[in-house]
Image (tube, rainbow, N blue to C red):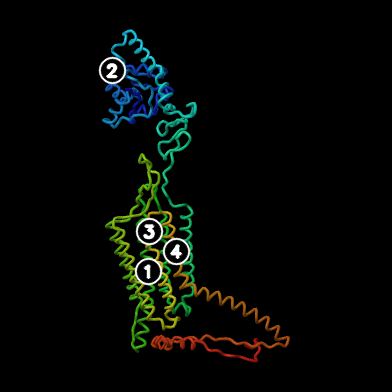
Amino acid sequence: TMSTIKTVKDPKDKAAQLTDFTTLTQLQAGGGTACVPEGTYLREVVMNKFPRANYSDCPSPNECVQRLRDGVCSLYVDDELALRYRALNDRSLEVTGEQFNTQYIVWPISYNMDREKSLLLKKWMYTSVSNATLDDLSYKYFDVKVCPLGLAGPSCDKKCDPKHGTSDRDGKCICQSSKWTGEDCSIEVEEDLNLYPDWEVYLAYALFAINAFACLLCFVWVHLKRYTRLVKLWQPFFLKFILLGCFVSSASIIPTTQQSEGDGPVYGCMVFPWLYCIGFSITLGTLLSKIFRVYRLFQAASRAQRVTITARETLLMIFGITIVDVAVIAVWSGVAPLHWKRTITSTDHFGQPLSSAGYCTSDYWKVFVTIIVAWHLVLMLMASYLCYLTRNISSQFAESKYLAISLFSNLQITVVSTPVLIIVKADPSTSLFIRSIVIWINDFAILAIIFGKWWCCFLLLVTRAWFSQHCMQQCSAWNHSGNLMYSVHTIKVEIDISTAVSMFSVPAESEAARRRSDRRLSVIALRPLEEQ
């Protein structure tokens, strides 16, 4: 049988923490002290191998352990089995990876051997163990000789971190965990936190800035054009509320970019549903109250009834729709608010984390998200039904076509994006990108559909004015040269209230006839363009 010499240390030892010795080679180079049991054979072996180290002789193994804890010595040298047994019963002790000098403590010798020969043989065996001759023979015929702990290389002259690496038979320093790298296994691999990339955060800010600038631009335009006939028909009150809802909803992109390298806190987790739900409710509530108000007015007019719908009633309708979202989010915030949680996604074989992912979650988030999505779907379906009922009203009074397009856009984005966001919830980077794009498209589509037509008309008028002036100058020159210009043009007929009410009362099959009556064709012939 055989036994191996090993060392043990106390990680809580203050002296060991200052010097951080793991091997006797480090202890000898750093001038540290090792505790060894006095009167034992291994004491001689250790002192012969490391003569320049300092030693503290202990009368018993328990005394060595006590001196190790008191900081008298940095390492305690003893038999491997004894040290492992003590470390198993005392969790404060840590067995190092260093081992040397396999001691053969029992040899088969015949009882009939000559006494003098037996003594000489035993002396030779002890000497062979002492000068490591038996170790060399064992390495030559039975074992593979590797570099001592803390060393590597073909000649064992290179460093190998004794805590995280060991040398193989070729002298290469092999890291015990993928958390450490480098030629000497001394470089710690940082945990992959899967944080949001900088470009995604900047993209989210840019998307919010686009919608915020568009809302501000439209607000200024509505305020400046509030006395024009077109804006009066659509009512600046409703338009400003739509812009407010889109701005608040788009502002929810900002808290989604907040993150933490640990377990938080991240206050943006719960701020996001507040901003998005309130902004969505204001926008959708305004569109719904607008189309509902026009429907009631024209329905009463078609029956020759008088009805008055005040701004207070409209505000109460918007407030009633918004308060439902506020109530659900308030209960959510009180019962199980969203909080930041970081989950380890991969570890090494020692349990050290290699990668993790952080996201916002709560115990009942699925319940509250289902309630909110169902409520929004009910509102959008109601609004779509009202758009269908008012499809025959002139677009000058209701803009039901554009409202229907906006509602269908919201409905489509909600139905498609909700399951996608749930699927990619565990991937923070993808989740942020999709969430930001969905919010931006949803709000920007409403702005483009409702306000985009007016901006296009404005640009068209400016272009036509320039084009008409340019043609007038050219035609004037042609007229003076004897040429006559003839033209065919269309004149848009301004519709009045009575015609709009009658159109609301006619069935859908008369829609084509109504559109043909909206324009009349006049031909002005044999007249110079200057006179026109």
159 to 322, vertically: above or below: above
Q: Hey, what amino acid is under mark 4?
A: Trp
Going from the N terminus, do you reach mark 4 or mark 2 first? Answer: 2
Distance Cα–Cα, label 1 vs label 3? 28 Å
Point out the frontmost of discs 3 and 4: 3
Q: Mark 4 sits on what residue?
A: 440
Picture coordinates of residue 60, whole percent (x, y): 27, 19
Going from the N terminus, do you reach mark 1 or mark 3 first? Answer: 1
Q: Mark 3 sits on what residue?
A: 423
Picture coordinates of residue 84, whole percent (x, y): 30, 28
The residue lying toward the viewer, choosing from 522 and 145, is: 145
Q: Hey, what amino acid is under mark 3?
A: Ile
Q: Pointer 2: residues within 10 angstroms few (<14), some, or many (20+)?
A: few
User: Which of the labelled discs sits on residue 59, or is there none?
Assistant: 2
Picture coordinates of residue 296, whole percent (x, y): 35, 81
Distance Cα–Cα, label 2 vs label 1? 83 Å
Point out the frontmost of discs 1 and 3: 3
